[in-house]
Amino acid sequence: MRALGGALIALVLAGCSEPAPDASAAVTADWQAFEATPTTVPARLAPDARATLAGAWSLASADTDRLHDISDIKADGYGRLFLVSDVGDLIELPEAVAERRSAGRLRRLTGRMGLPLAEKETGDAEGLVVLPDGQVLVSFERRHRITLYSGQGVYVGPANAPTGRMKPNRGIEAIAETPDGGWWAAAEDGRLWRCGFGERCRREKARLAGPGVAVTGMALDPRTGRLLVLRREMRPKGFVSSIWAVDPVRLVERDPPMAEVARLDAAAGLPDNFEGIGARRLADGRLRLWLVSDDGFNSRTVLVALDLS
């Protein structure tokens, strides 16, 4: 919908600068093929959940050790899942990976000179949006920014990003497409901004999280235009992740009404640290939600599919 013209506007209006790439990075920016194997994870949702569980799987690969530390996931509507990791990888998998061993590919994201980003230092990717024209937006922490890439993961330029004060590892944790083709950007503490190619980011009044609760992901419900917010809490038995729906019209309120869609926790068999959420409309009108966990390279990467009537 907005191709190169929008990208050029983004380059002019962006309120952030791109860091220099790491010329000594050992990982190349070329696509690398791999196969991922799913293993079913026993799970269940609470009886009062608004969503139904389509399945949960742990993902592993004998071809790469980079199918870990995943921070966001989005579906493009054509059967593909896009994921980003905390070490700067863009990963592409078919939705069929939930059913059988499937071929995927990954590449290290790059900076303005085309060289790979330096893992955590400049490549701490946290949020992802797949735009209608196939380009992708990626938000980063530590060096807080949002960058526009082509659908093939090629660097295009900086995009408008919030400029408020943020801690190094508490930056732009989540981004989601807005109904009008822009994007929302949220900090982990719940602050929310609305951004676009032709407009700088402006702060929304709403706060999407409070003390002890963190925003970890966001997605747009393409059926209703509602914003879906993934939040995380720490409990003695592990992480508690919950999905909440909010009407964008109510974002002018400090504490907008939010409806809980589902909760993933130890009782559900899913005490993992879910940081990514994506949504797409199914042929029968239901909404498919995809969630992915960040294992910190020391546990399991879990993919969850939920359906919402």
Image (cartoon, rainbow, N blue to C red):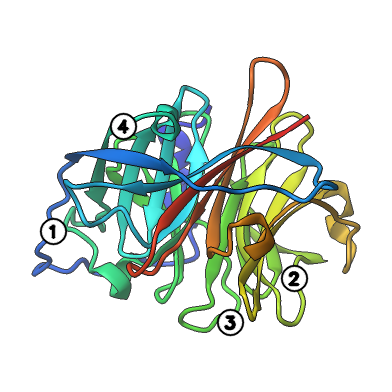
Question: N-terminal of the two: label 4 or label 3?
Answer: 4
Residue 46: x %, y % from top left: 77, 51
Mark 3 and 2 residues: CB-CB less than 8 Å, in contact?
Answer: no
Left or right: residue 36 versus residue 182 is left
In terms of image quadrants, where is residue 181? Answer: top right
* Badge nearest the viewer, 4 or 3: 4
Residue in the picture at 60% in, 57% down: 269
* Badge nearest the viewer, 4 or 1: 4
Residue in the picture at 64% in, 22% down: 282
Which residue is situated farthest in the front direction here? Answer: 42
Residue 205: x %, y % from top left: 82, 66
Mark 2 and 1 residues: CB-CB less than 8 Å, in contact?
Answer: no
Question: N-terminal of the two: label 2 or label 4?
Answer: 4
Image height of 212 relative to 117, above or below: below
The residue at which mark 1 appears reads as: 27
Mark 2 and 4 residues: CB-CB less than 8 Å, in contact?
Answer: no
* Badge nearest the viewer, 2 or 4: 4
Q: Can residue 241 be seen in the rendering of this structure?
A: no
Identified by mark 2, the residue type is Ala
Identified by mark 3, the residue type is Arg
The residue at which mark 3 appears reads as: 165
Compute the Cα span from label 4 to label 3. 43 Å
- Secondary element under disc 2, as helix, strand or loop, is loop
Question: N-terminal of the two: label 2 or label 1?
Answer: 1
Q: Relative to the observer, which residue lies in front, 230 or 248?
A: 230
Compute the Cα span from label 1 to label 3. 31 Å
Image height of 272 relative to 77, above or below: below
